[in-house]
Image (cartoon, grey):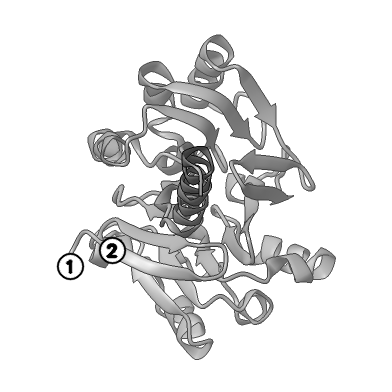
Amino acid sequence: MSRAITRQVALLLALLLALFTLGCTDTPDADLRITVIDVGQGDATLLSQAGRHMLIDTGSAYAADALLRELEANGVKKLDLLVLTHPHEDHVGNARRLLMELEVETLVVPTDIAVDFGYDLVLATARERCDDLRVVCAGDEIVLGDARCTVLYAQVNAEDWNDASIVLRVEYGETALLFMGDAGAKIEAELLRKMPQLLDCDFLRVGHHGSEDATTGAFLSAATPTLAAVGCGEQNTYGFPHAAVLENLDVMGVRVWRTDLDGTVVFISDGENIRFHSKSKGA
């Protein structure tokens, strides 16, 4: 065999080896990482995929340092999407600070009507600093890397702001996640009536911190999650999560993590399965 042919064969073998190695290399950035952040009595969940980040709610202002530490620990220097499910302080209390301290490409809200001074400041800051302020309604879609997010519900003129909550379905590969904000039984019943097939999920971010006015048995029968997470504060005065909700989840065989007991909890979806990854308390 001539030297030139030998070099060509060696080059071909090296190329094939490189392609094989690339195909077999574990690429954790390709996974969807779900970080349910312990912000005390409030909600904040970070979704990360392929270097892109979406934060759903921000917790109360008193939890700002804890939230920022967790974002830093996850390497978040920019939020591609900041979703505020509804205007209550325990969900939007850190939004303005994040808008001031981080680059936020798109703010997603159920309404751009000023419901109070704090929310008005958030909207005003977003108009100054964000590339896009999106007011969403049912049927709207959001993209985070390879994850597709569908708004199942959002209400502009709700009398109770909990019932304005953005309900978000996230699909990554064959897996599905459902984020309920503070939507209660009334909204669950509406979703059951209009789109029961879209409630089916592997992971549930339990609505309204585990309040007994949400997460009904009928809703869980349609959703059939295997994993769930509740955002609530230690020894909170509301008694969250309520015993009836925990019983409903237990009857359905759902494994439940709580930020009051488990701290920040991380789940990983590889597109086929979602698995529990870690927690910050009692690990």
Coordinates of residue 217 in the picture (x, y in percent): 61, 81
The mark total stands at: 2
In this figure, which residue is indicated by the disc labeled 2? 278
Q: Is residue 115 above or below residue 170?
A: above
Q: Quadrant of the C terminus?
A: bottom left
Q: Nearest the camera: 174 or 252?
A: 174
Query: What residue is shown at x 24% (from left), y 67% (from top)?
Result: 261
The reply to whether callout 2 and callout 1 are in contact (CB within 8 Å) is yes
Which element carries disc 1, helix, strand or loop?
loop
The 10 Å Cα crowd at callout 1, few under 14, some 14 to 19, many 20 or more, is few
In the figure, is residue 83 to the left or right of 186? left
Work out whether residue 236 or residue 72 is closer to the camera in this orientation and state it: 72
Looking at the rendered structure, the secondary structure element under dot 2 is: strand
Q: Which numbered circle lies on residue 283?
A: 1
Q: Residue at x 59, y 61 (%)?
A: 178
Cα distance in 3D space between marks 2 and 1:
7 Å
Residue 86 % position (x, y): 57, 41
Residue 185 horizontal side relative to residue 91, left or right: right
When the figure is inspected, residue 5 is found, relative to residue 265, above or below; the finding is above
Q: Residue at x 28, y 63 (%)?
A: 278
